[in-house]
Image: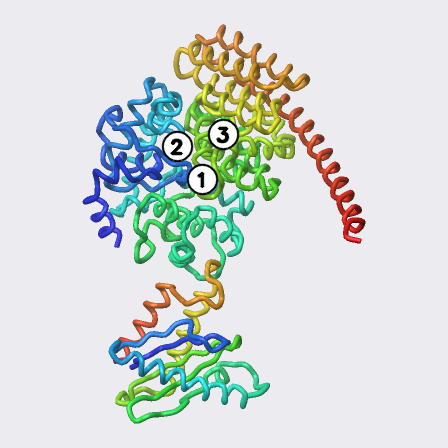
Amino acid sequence: MMSKSDGDICFGNPTELHGTKAQIPNVATEKNTFTRLDDEDKQQEAQSPTMSPLASPPSSPPHYQRVPLIHGYSKLRSSTEQMHPAPYEARQPLVQSEGPSSGGPGAKAPRHQASLIRSFSVEREAQDSNSNYPDEPWRITEEQREYYVNQFRSLQPDPSSFISGSVAKNFFTKSKLSIPELSYIWELSDADCDGALTLPEFCAAFHLIVARKNGYPLPESLPPTLQPDYLQAAFPKPKWECALFDSYSESMPASQQARDSNRMEKATIKDAAADFPAPTQATTGDDSQAIPKDSSSLKARPRSRSYSSTSIEEAMKRGEDPPTPPPRPQKTHSRASSLDLNKVFQPSVPATKSGLLPPPPALPPRPCASQSEQALDAESHPQLSRAPSQAAESSPTKKDTHAQPPLKPIRRKFRTENQATENQEPSATVGGPSSAATAKAHPTVQKQSSKQKKAIQTAIRKNKEANAVLARLNSELQQQLKEVHQERIALENQLEQLRPVTVL
Amino acid sequence: MAVCVAVIAKENYPLYIRSVPTESELKFHYMVHTSLDVVDEKISAMGKALVDQRELYLGLLYPTEDYKVYGYVTNSKVKFVMVVDSSNTALRDNEIRSMFRKLHNSYTDVMCNPFYNPGDRIQSRAFDSMVTTMMIQVC
């Protein structure tokens, strides 16, 4: 089955790669690239096809799509700062591919993507060595796994429990696949036919949906790499990472790993924290948005990954389409839902890292800032966007300092933030402190760019400041939300009172 | 061997019907249709009988010269009708029961799929493959 489908795909290479598969996420391409081009220079990779917003964030890279897709990303990315293996980063390009797709406008995204791809390739090689299964498209990568796990958690907080059939149905229906196909995918993935999905079953189903959206024909039976047993054995980490999300205390020891991991973890933890409470609290409207956020933040989590965690999150959010509506508007919503971070924020206070960094902030500051600006303006949550963007920038800033000559990226980010703040409506209280924090952060970082330790400490401080700002924002926004709810209730009451009068 | 397997909904419309020798499909469809009357007879005769495997299995509905028709009803009044070749005298009652049990299990699995709306035609490939197995192996 798989071989057959792969073979079919291979024959259809050129056209599929470049033309039609608009929906092939970068992730998919990355995967292919990795399998094929383990030793190839990533920079040779061709531009990946534009990812339509509907593409699922993680996609099993088709076998044949190897080089061209990933090459594109590497080209786009100029700097090689992100050579670190970062599975989450790999996901990021996939998600980000939607935006930059052609690589032109989204300079940052491609950069991140390229870096992610490289890191991903490293990751990929490791994964390949672990498995003997030849069906690459059906193997779930680390990043994809994390994304799936995040999505699972958004639907069902307990990773060891089930997702009921109706919940899963609503979730998968958002992928816009036809009902018979979804029914078939369910058949394949629900191994025990109990009408509920465990975590590995959910990952398998999600992976099949992603593959289907990328044009892969569905297999006749569940591929061995998607069997629940295999998934349970192959990916113990994500569960561990999921656990991390739940408890900041765990994040502390995790962060004590290499500096890179520390930095990443900070960003990831924030994202995780932000995402985690967000989905649970998200209302019907926010659900979709929260979900992408969570997925993105969760992806950023991978411990040893470096810098681009925030960008990955951003990318994931954008890329998350199957489960949710168009990405852009989601960002704003996700931010709003991130207000619930307060709950998570409080326990995470001991965790020095700026835990509750809302997902919106992404590595590519410019696109993030612009997007956040747009979203915020639309949502009229300027404060929130500013704080997150600032927080995000601080985290990526930290990372950058560690990785490379920090000044330049920092400056860029600062500019972005400045632009963001200027563009957005001035939120007196929140905006002030956040911008101040940002301003403070920048010079500090610049001074200590040469010293990594000081830079890390600076990053920690920034994160703390961002955390405080975000906490304030959260409380304020929650108050606003309550007020709005009350107004709504009052209006509804008035409407009800008026109705009988008119009827009579 | 089962030459025809049919799943009939409570309202007596087919959810799934499949015959092995496809050239005489219409004949089998007709046989299944006529057997529904017999099924309804037996169901009403059961009355408030306890629901267990025995009651679910209706046994031989009516024999013809070439075929035998067996029936099975679930608790939700979904009926399974199976037409077997009379020449297969080796088929015992227990085997028919086990076949119906497998059918019932597969039908339950189809029901568990949240994307399946009760009342739709059964398009599950797993169900198809199971029926194919049943039709072939008994030969």
2 and 1 marks on the same chain: yes
The image's mark for residue A268 is: 3
The answer to whether residue B4 is above or below residue A439 is below
Task: Please report whichever mark, 2 or 1, sits nearer to the chain's N-terminal start.
Answer: 2
Would you say A294 lies left or right of B23 here? right
Residue B33 at what x, y percent from top left?
40, 83
Q: Is A370 placed left or right of B20 in the picture?
A: right
Q: Amino acid at mark 1?
A: Asp
Q: List the residue tagged with mark 2.
A: A98
- Residue at mark 1: A321
* B114 displayed left or right of B131: right
Q: CA distance from mark 1 to mark 3?
A: 21 Å
Which label lies toward us, 1 or 3? 1
The residue depicted at 44 percent of the width and 46 percent of the height is: A175
In the rendered view, tell whether residue B88 sits above or below residue A50. Answer: below
Q: Is residue A107 above or below residue A155?
A: above
Q: Position of residue A332 (x, y in %)?
A: 55, 31
Q: Which one is closest to the eye, mark 3 or mark 2?
A: 2
Q: Amino acid at mark 3?
A: Thr
